[in-house]
Image: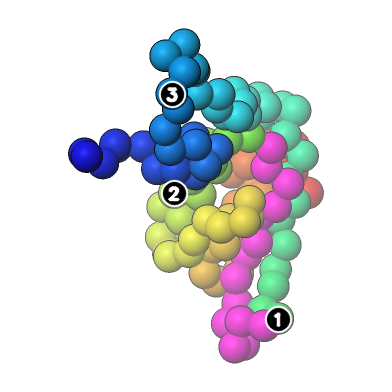
Amino acid sequence: MAKSNQSSTSNGGIVFSTNPDFQYQTNESAPEQSLPPKQQNLRVQFDKKSRGGKQVTLVTGFIGNETDLNELGKRLKTLCGTGGSVKDGEILVQGDFREKILNWLTQQGYRAK
């Protein structure tokens, strides 16, 4: 018996059905659409708690899909010329770049404070 390419979790735990008309039902929803920049309400914060004393600029409040968030994070890291990460719906940029990020976001049409 050959293994299928789909995992059993994507089929709701159903491995085999004797019903020839059986159709697997998926619970996948449509991907979340990103709001336009003028409708985004972003918050730019400075944080160094629970980071071993390291300073980071934190951008929160982005509403949209993960790829758009990753793209915005990449642009902000490139703008500041530093590293960072995107996780849990937040963009972390290493260092204190609040003013630079805030100015760039407002120039791009984002509502940020």
Residue for point 52% across, 42% down: 13
Q: Which residues are magenta?
A: 50-63
Q: In terms of image quadrants, where is residue 90?
A: bottom right
> Which residue is more in the foreground, 25 or 54?
25
> Distance from label 3 to label 1 (Cα)?
57 Å
> Which residue is more in the foreground, 45 or 97?
45
Looking at the picture, which amino acid does disc 2 mark?
A: Lys
Residue 74: which disc?
Answer: 2
In this rendering, would 93 be left or right of 38? left
Residue 11: which disc?
Answer: none
Looking at the picture, which amino acid does disc 1 mark?
A: Lys
Q: Dot 1 corresponds to which residue?
A: 49
The answer to which of marks 2 and 1 sits earlier in the sequence is 1
Can you give x and y, in whole percent of width and height, for residue 53 in the image?
A: 62, 87
Dots 3 and 1: beta carbons under 8 Å?
no
Q: Is residue 74 visible?
A: yes
The answer to which of marks 2 and 3 sits earlier in the sequence is 3
Residue for point 41% across, 60% down: 81
Residue for point 70% across, 81% down: 49
